[in-house]
Image (cartoon, rainbow, N blue to C red):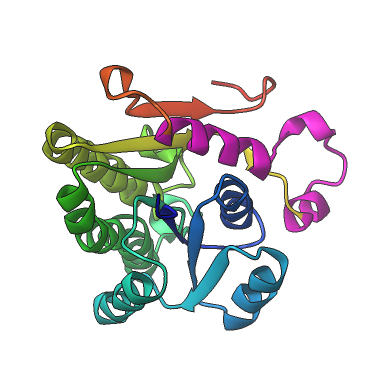
Amino acid sequence: MAERVCVVAGVGPGNGAALTRRFARSGYRVAMLARSPERLASLEREIGASRGYAVDVTDRHGLEAVFERIRAELGAPDVLVHNAGEGSFHAFLDASPEALERSFRTNALALLYLGQLAAPAMLEKGRGDIVVIGATASLRGGANFAAFAPAKAAQRSLAQSMARSLGPRGIHVSYVVVDGVIDLPRTRRLLPDRPDAFFLKPSAIAETVYHLVQQDPSAWTFEVDVRPFGEKW
């Protein structure tokens, strides 16, 4: 049987790298999408089953060219994970229109682009998985989330529409609400006094995503939230 192909959009040192490792470990060929060629080249050397494609996920024409290359070099995607994110955290009166627009383009508009490019091949196969990495801001707008929460709410709503439209045709669309602080060197430096249990481990998030794409169609999950036990909710 041909190797399955997973596209991870938004590959950084946290969730994106962890997702790539998890799917590669299970035999997937992983296409990594990110803006940084250097980061992609480093991960390619580390993860043999991966291949990097430098692209901005808000660039429709750039994504079209990348998906053509993925199909030619790896095969048609079986799984798409939209992990790319953009956020600016300010109170309403301080939030700029430009910040909200950037967030909307990366979180919501890019999902439309990516989904429309990945879904046709999945429909031909009669199966596929699209997983969207979301945030608690998709459910409620905090005081300092005026330039972020509306974009994540739009992303979640779009994912719901995708699930309702594509589910009957064999494509499982799911949304992961990440509630908490990701464990990264940067966040550790910002919060040096917090214990290990305070942070969300990227490898654990990747495990949840992998579980979602293994679900039987009779019991698909649309939305799952992940958080450390100490997070208030």
Front one among 110 and 49: 49
Q: Which residue is drawn at 35% across and 61% down?
A: 100
Q: In this view, does 30 lie above or below 211?
A: below
Q: Which residue is drawn at 36% across and 32% down?
A: 139
Q: Where is residue 69 in the image (x, y as percent from the top left)?
A: 35, 78
In the figure, residue 173 lies in which quadrant? top left
* Residue 82 visible in the snapshot: yes
Q: In this view, does 98 lie above or below 222?
A: below
Q: Is residue 203 above or below residue 195?
A: below
Q: Residue at x 35, y 65 (%)?
A: 75
Q: Where is residue 3 in the image (x, y as percent from the top left)?
A: 44, 54
Q: How many labels does the image show?
A: 0
Task: Name, please, the residue furthest toward the right.
Answer: 193
Task: Name, please, the residue furthest toward the front.
Answer: 1
Q: In this view, does 207 lie to the left or right of 152?
A: right
Task: Please name the predominant secondary structure of the magenta segment in the image.
Answer: helix
Give the magenta range.
185-213
Front one among 111 and 117: 117
Q: Indicate yes or no whether the magenta region holds residue 203.
A: yes
Q: Where is residue 150 in the image (x, y as percent from the top left)?
A: 32, 48
Q: Indicate yes or no whether the magenta region holds residue 199.
A: yes
Front one among 153 and 7: 7
Q: Position of residue 215 (x, y in %)?
A: 39, 26
Q: In which quarter of the image is the C terminus?
A: top right
Q: Is residue 232 above or below residue 144?
A: above
Front one among 3 and 68: 3
